[in-house]
Amino acid sequence: MGFKPVKVGICGLGTVGSGTFNVLQRNQEEISRRAGRVIRVEQIGARRPNPLADTNGTQIVADVFAVARNPEIDVVVELIGGCDVARELVLEAIENGKHVVTANKALIAVHGNEIFEAAQRKNVMVAFEASVAGGIPIVKAIREGLAANSINWVAGIINGTGNFILTEMRDKGRAFEDVLAEAQQLGYAEADPTFDVEGIDAAHKLTILASLAFGVPLQFSKAYTEGISKITADDVNYAEQLGYRIKHLGITRRTDAGIELRVHPTLIPEKRLIANVDGVMNAVLVDADAVGPTLYYGAGAGAEPTASAVIADLVDVVRTLTADRDNRVPHLAFHPSRLSDLPMLPMEEVETAYYLRLQAAENPGVLAEITRILADQQISIDAIMQHGTDDQLVPIIILTHVVKEVRMNAAIKAIEALETISGEVTRIRVEILDAN
Ligand code: HSE
């Protein structure tokens, strides 16, 4: 191979950093046959040593910024995570003319617009395949593979920890906290596990997917986020009786009024392939006008699956090192000067169907009162289920047709105000996920 090796600096030597180093070493021959050049790790920046990582004598420095400034290095791989230091590091690398590969979803979702602008100015690339759904090449699929299409919507199980918790609750009847502790031991959970269970991690990833699908700037602050911590075993069971599974979905859909950007527990028909994605696995379903629905499935986290995406980015960067910025794949799939200003819709404007669970007194006329309230809000009922019990309170489950969220909010408020209703109404959104 006639070209000089490309020199890479890896910042961060945790799970993904050491995984990336290992895969680069193990598959060096095949990777260089693909890239057309040898990809060599020149230096590693690690604020803390990792006794578990065998870095084969590669120089390690404690100051990650030294890697960003090292004149020998062509590409900086940012794997330290978090937002503050990572942002500074990436901007410093760009200022020094380095290309950047990152697995950092929070960084891209929150600071991506600023970072891409800096990269455009300096004519360098910032690649972020590993930031969404780990090893699944979903960024490449949407940005390049679906480039002919007008995309209608994207729905994904994009947090492995949350999916693992819901799967174990359903299959084994395990308690929420118990399963979360196991996910933490497996090394999947975020440093702050509320990011997983409250949907923040998924919202970071969904923000990126929405921008790639619809060509809009990254707008994490507009994402609606609802976690899984209030899902009960009863809801899981009732959903199953009605032919649905509960999944924690990130959904982004383009409508005439704007773009939906929402993460919340969702009932989906059990016959959908995505409803059967279990455990820590991720899946992203994309509905596009020409190709129809396509589904991408695989490991959404872990050392080597994430390394797989990081190294694919490295190969991409190496292949286009000498290309001008106008001839590279744009960061957000659409040319930066052609991004759309279609607004993100507030949650109240979103249209979806609903599962409602309420506790009603065993009195004549209760159901009539409830259905009257729903009718007043023009909410049409799809199914109703009431189980007789010996208790004073009976659970009533209602599935509705699609309605604007603002109407459902009003209906729930009115139902909760009824004397015959005890406590809060549980509301879980329902998505059929059929192609347009
Ligand atoms: N905490 C994330 C998950 C890791 O559970 O999917 C990958 O981003």
Image (spheres, rainbow, N blue to C red):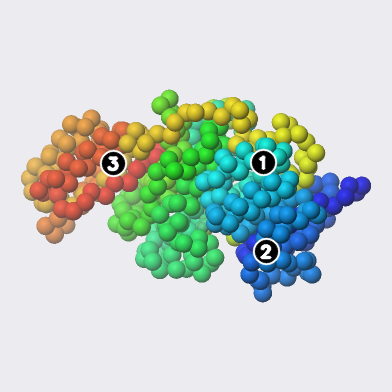
Looking at the rendered structure, the secondary structure element under dot 2 is loop
For label 1, the crowd category at 10 Å Cα-Cα, with few meaning under 14, some 14 to 19 and many 20 or more, is many
Which residue is identified by label 3?
399
Query: In the image, what residue occupies the spot 21% across and 51% down?
Result: 424
Q: Of label 3 and label 2, which has the lower sequence position?
A: 2
Residue 106 rendering spot, x and y as whole percentages? 53, 51
Q: Amino acid at mark 1?
A: Ala
Residue 331 visible within the image:
yes
Image location of residue 343, percent across then percent down:
44, 31
Q: What is the C-alpha distance between the residues marked 1 and 3?
A: 48 Å
The amino acid at mark 2 is: Asp
Residue at the spot x=62%, y=38% of the render? Answer: 117
**Badge 3: residue crowd in 10 Å (few <14, some 14–19, many ≥20):** many
Q: What residue is rendered at 46% in x and 57% in y?
A: 196
**260 with respect to 428 (left or right):** right
The residue at the point 79 percent across, 59 percent down is 42
Residue 63 is tagged as: 2
| Farthest residue, direction left | 364
Find numbered disc 1 in the image and state the secondary structure of the residue it sits on. Answer: helix
- Crowd around label 2: few <14 · some 14–19 · many ≥20 (10 Å): some
Please give left or right for residue 156 compared with residue 224 in the image: right
- Residue 186 coordinates in the image, percent (x, y): 53, 67
Vertical order, 180 against 417 (above or below) = below
Which mark sits nearer the N-terminus, 1 or 3?
1
**Res. 142 image quadrant:** top right
Kindly indicate the quadrant of the structure image that contains residue 150.
Answer: top right
* Rendered image: mark on residue 119: 1
Between 155 and 234, which is closer to the camera in this rendering? 155
